[in-house]
Image (spheres, rainbow, N blue to C red):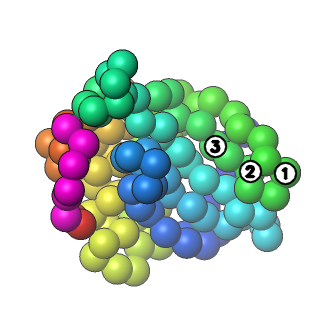
Amino acid sequence: MIPQIGQLLSIEMIRDGGSLAMSFITKGTEFWLFFGVRFNNDNSERLGYCEPVIVNRLIGTQTQVSWASALSLLTSAHQFVENVEDKNWLIVMESVAKSEGKLPAKVERFIGPWSSL
């Protein structure tokens, strides 16, 4: 079962090189919707994203979910977004989910300095 959002904490690119995460709370437990970044062999180029997982931060479990389920959860997050940066990252995550893991235009393919959305 996919948890429903009770409170949105943040939506961001993780500093591991480009993974994307939406963190939220449901019934007192923190969860992440997580898209792990995929790299080429020498880790210099982002290729796209791994299948989405829901991470239960309290007990450390991960559950793989479909791209359609991830997109549904992301769509439900719009009502909770309170700042522009989270909104921008939400749009990026939705783009990834709609394309089933393809690298969106707003994420640089090659690793190097990049700016915030």
In the image, is 12 to the left or to the right of 29? left
- The residue that mark 3 highlights is 54
In this view, the residue farthest toward the front is 42
Q: Which residue is drawn at 60% across and 64% down?
A: 24
Residue 23: tell me if it is visible: yes
Q: Are marks 3 and 2 in contact (CB under 8 Å)?
A: yes
Density class for disc 1 (Cα within 10 Å; few <14, some 14-19, many ≥20) is few
SS at badge 3: strand
> How many marks overall?
3
Q: Is the magenta stretch mostly helix, strand or loop?
A: loop
Where disc 1 sits, the SS reads loop
Examine the structure image and report whether residue 111 is included in the region drawn in magenta. Answer: yes
Q: Which amino acid does label 1 sit on?
A: Ile
Name the residue carrying label 2: 56
| Nearer-the-camera pick, 116 or 79 | 116
Q: Residue at x 49, y 69 (%)?
A: 10
Marks 3/1: CA distance?
12 Å
- In the displayed structure, 62 sits above or below 117; it is above
Which quadrant, please, contains the N terminus? top right
Q: How far apart are marks 1 and 2 (CA)?
A: 6 Å
- Is 58 positioned to the left or the right of 104 in the image? right
Residue stretch rendered in magenta on the structure: 110-115
In the picture, the disc for residue 59 is 1
Label 2 crowd (10 A; few <14 / some 14-19 / many >=20)? some
Q: Going from the N terminus, do you reach mark 3 or mark 1 first?
A: 3
Q: Nearer the viewer, residue 54 or 40?
A: 40
